[in-house]
Image (cartoon, rainbow, N blue to C red):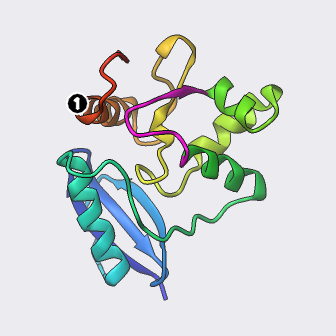
């Protein structure tokens, strides 16, 4: 069974999705959902996201189940290793995955991340600290990075 609920956030409305056991999606919505059906996982997800946006937590402890290819799963698992308040480039991500030539594939997989914010694809930036590519819009990526810088011990990264 699929569950969905809406969360109002500093980024606008977020659609939270779950299979009842894990978070399966977090995406940006321009409109409110007509039908919502929540579950315990989504209630916990909402709570943790609200704490994240208020700067009271620096990470998430949620069961995640993003659907994707084996390569996408590897990229998303690597994203989870990027510390709060830090960024890496697409090239660095490709190198961490063992193939600098896979930079375009890494960028594509990053862009297809179905669980925004919790799987922190916003922490991947272009060369020279350039803010590029974010499915929710560059303004949301910038806001997320600024939020993390505000609450991070690292204050040296500028965007």
User: Relative to 69, does residue 80 appear above or below in the rendering?
Assistant: above
Q: Residue furthest left?
A: 54
User: Relative to 29, does residue 21 appear above or below in the rendering?
Assistant: below
Disc 1 target residue? 150
Left or right of residue 148, residue 3 in this image: right
Q: Residues within 10 Å of mark 1 (few under 14, many from 20)?
A: few
Using the image as rendered, state which of residue 89 and residue 133 is in the foreground: 89
Residue at 34% x, 29% y: name it: 142
Q: Residue furthest front?
A: 153
Residue at 30% x, 73% y: name it: 44
Left or right of residue 30, residue 102 in this image: right
Residue at 80% x, 35% y: name it: 98
**Residue 11 percent location from the top left of the image:** 26, 45
Q: Is residue 150 magenta?
A: no
User: Relative to 154, does residue 66 appear above or below in the rendering?
Assistant: below
Main SS of the magenta segment? loop
Left or right of residue 23, residue 143 in this image: left
**Residue 53 percent location from the top left of the image:** 22, 48
């Amino acid at each position: 069974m699929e569950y969905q609920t809406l969360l109002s956030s500093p980024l606008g409305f977020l659609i939270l999705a779950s299979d009842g056991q894990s978070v399966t999606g977090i995406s940006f919505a321009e409109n409110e959902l007509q039908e919502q059906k929540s579950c315990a996982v989504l209630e916990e997800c909402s709570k943790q996201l609200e704490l994240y946006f208020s700067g009271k937590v620096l990470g998430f402890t949620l069961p995640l189940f993003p659907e994707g290819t084996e390569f996408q799963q590897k990229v998303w698992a690597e994203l989870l290793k990027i510390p709060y308040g830090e960024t890496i480039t697409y090239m660095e991500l490709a190198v961490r995955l063992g193939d600098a030539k896979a930079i375009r594939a890494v960028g594509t997989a990053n862009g297809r991340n179905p669980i925004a914010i919790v799987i922190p694809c916003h922490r991947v930036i272009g060369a020279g600290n350039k803010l590029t590519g974010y499915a929710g819009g560059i303004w949301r990526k910038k806001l997320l990075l600024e939020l993390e810088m505000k609450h991070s011990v690292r204050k040296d990264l500028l965007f």
